[in-house]
């Protein structure tokens, strides 16, 4: 772009993008963020973040507790558990709002592959794993 528009200095953007991408691809950073979020949300009975196995985690390998469940975007799967999608949405908004507004922690890994719903004892509340009525919202 600078070749065509010399006044447009964008080299900083490429450098910033490269640095951000390298941080994003470092799984030790992701492991740290998961452990930090688990600590921040430890008093939320409906939230569970999988345990990180730091001794087996490297910049290229993230090792966490295995979690089973239904993806938050699998509406038929949620309904088969007796979970209303609105309940899951409320829990996700609450969890990420707590991280941001109570703890000042920004966690932007909000995608359906990171959040699972698990069934629990009828009559109990929703739960989340990592990062989800009778069910449990779990971040995988």
Image (cartoon, rainbow, N blue to C red):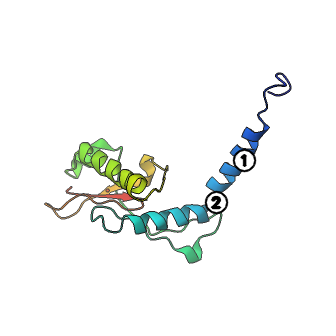
Give the answer, above or below, for where 30 lies relative to 8. below
State how many labels appear: 2
- Residue occupying image coordinates x 15% and y 61%: 122
Splitting the image into 4 quarters, where does residue 136 fall? bottom left
Label 2, on which residue?
Answer: 26
The Cα atoms of the two marked residues, 2 and 1, are separated by: 13 Å
Give the answer, above or below, for where 108 lies relative to 39. above
Q: Residue furthest top?
A: 4
Label 1, on which residue?
Answer: 18
Q: Position of residue 81 (x, y in %)?
A: 22, 52
Q: Give the quadrant of the N terminus.
A: top right
Q: Residue furthest left?
A: 123
Q: Give the quadrant of the C terminus.
A: bottom left
Label 1: element kind? helix
Q: Residue furthest bottom?
A: 55
Q: Is residue 37 left or right of residue 85?
A: right
Splitting the image into 4 quarters, where does residue 103 fall? bottom left
Q: Position of residue 90 (x, y in %)?
A: 28, 47
Q: Position of residue 3 (x, y in %)?
A: 86, 26
Label 2: element kind? loop
Q: Position of residue 113 (x, y in %)?
A: 44, 50
Give the answer, above or below, for where 1 lies relative to 113. above
Give the answer, above or below, for where 140 lies relative to 57. above
- Give the camera-side residue of 42 and 127: 42
Pointer 2 local density, CA inside 10 Å: few below 14, some 14–19, many at least 20: some
- Residue occupying image coordinates x 33% and y 44%: 74
Pointer 1 local density, CA inside 10 Å: few below 14, some 14–19, many at least 20: few
- Give the camera-side residue of 75 and 109: 109
């Amino acid at each position: 772009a600078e070749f065509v528009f010399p006044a447009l200095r964008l080299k900083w953007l490429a450098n910033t993008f490269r640095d951000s991408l390298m941080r994003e691809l470092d799984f030790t950073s992701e492991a740290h963020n998961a452990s930090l979020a688990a600590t921040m949300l430890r008093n939320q009975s409906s939230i569970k973040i999988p345990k990180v196995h730091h001794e087996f985690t490297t910049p290229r390998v993230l090792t966490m507790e295995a979690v089973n469940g239904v993806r938050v975007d699998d509406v038929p799967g949620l309904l088969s558990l007796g979970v209303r999608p609105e309940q899951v949405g409320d829990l996700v908004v609450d969890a990420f709002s707590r991280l941001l507004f109570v703890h000042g922690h920004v966690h932007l890994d909000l995608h359906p592959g990171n959040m699972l719903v698990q069934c629990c004892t009828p009559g109990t509340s929703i739960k989340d794993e990592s990062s989800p009525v009778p069910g449990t919202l779990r971040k995988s």
